[in-house]
Image (spheres, rainbow, N blue to C red):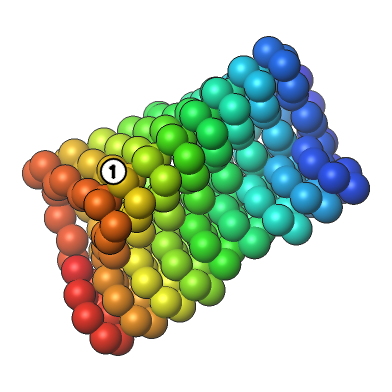
Amino acid sequence: LQHSSVEYCVANQSGGALYGDFDAHIRMVDSPIHHCEAGLHGGALLAEHGSDIYLLRSTISHSVAVVDGGAMMAEHNSLVILNASGISNCKALEGGAFYVFAGATVELCEGSVISECEARRGGAMFCDVNAHVRLADSPVSDCIASYDGGGIMAEHGSDVELRHSQITNCHAGHDGGAMMAEQGSILVLVDSGISNSSAGEHGGGFYVNLNASVTLQHSSVEYCVANQSGGA
């Protein structure tokens, strides 16, 4: 798709706008997707079984998945790359913008943005079962999880790396205002920052448990608040 748009599309199951399966390739350039909905996964887009999706200067907004990935779901070794693109105002039960699962990889670069997304867990992203996420020069802001991981939630051996990226103004009703990692997952921040985030219980910036780890290199955590313990 180039200089095209997809709007007001609905899938009863998955991939409200587009569904890529078994080594499919989807390219979008200067092409928005708005107001799409999926009854299960991937409100706008879904990639699985080695498929790949590439967005350049494209946006996804106001899309909803009833279960996972309000904007997009990537699973089973698929690859999604956003270059100078954005996701906003998307919702799902898990992963307001993205649900990344089972060895899939999601990369955001060149000023790609996730903002104002909502979920029960992982307001912006939910990363599960050896998922891989890389953000480079790409901010996450104003995302909300009603339970855990206001910005990004990672579990079951997933890894998330931020380089020159910021997570700001995110909130979790329970734990991990900006980021939460558990069950052997890994968070790495390099020249990045967490700020103005909050949690209803623990870890205003980070909440890390069950053999998970967080590493900060030349990075900062500022103005974060937890109602119970672990402000940063």
Q: Position of residue 192 (x, y in %)?
A: 22, 46
Q: Position of residue 212 (x, y in %)?
A: 27, 51
* Depth order, front residue of 116/77: 77
User: Dividing the image into 4 quarters, which one contains the N terminus?
Assistant: top right
13 vs 183, left or right, is right
Position of 6 relative to 122 (above/below): above
27 vs 188, left or right, is right
The residue depicted at 57 percent of the width and 67 percent of the height is 120
Q: How many marks?
A: 1
Position of 166 relative to 134 (above/below): below
* Depth order, front residue of 154/19: 154
8 vs 54, left or right, is right
37 vs 105, left or right, is right
* Depth order, front residue of 37/185: 185
Position of 102 relative to 194 (above/below): above
Which residue position holds label 1?
186
The residue depicted at 28 percent of the width and 60 percent of the height is 209
Question: Disc 1 residue type?
Answer: Ile
The residue depicted at 41 percent of the width and 50 percent of the height is 155
User: Could you say which quadrant of the image residue 4 lies in?
Assistant: top right
- Crowd rating for badge 1 (residues with CA inside 10 Å; few <14, some 14–19, many 20+): many
Q: Position of residue 169 (x, y in %)?
A: 38, 67
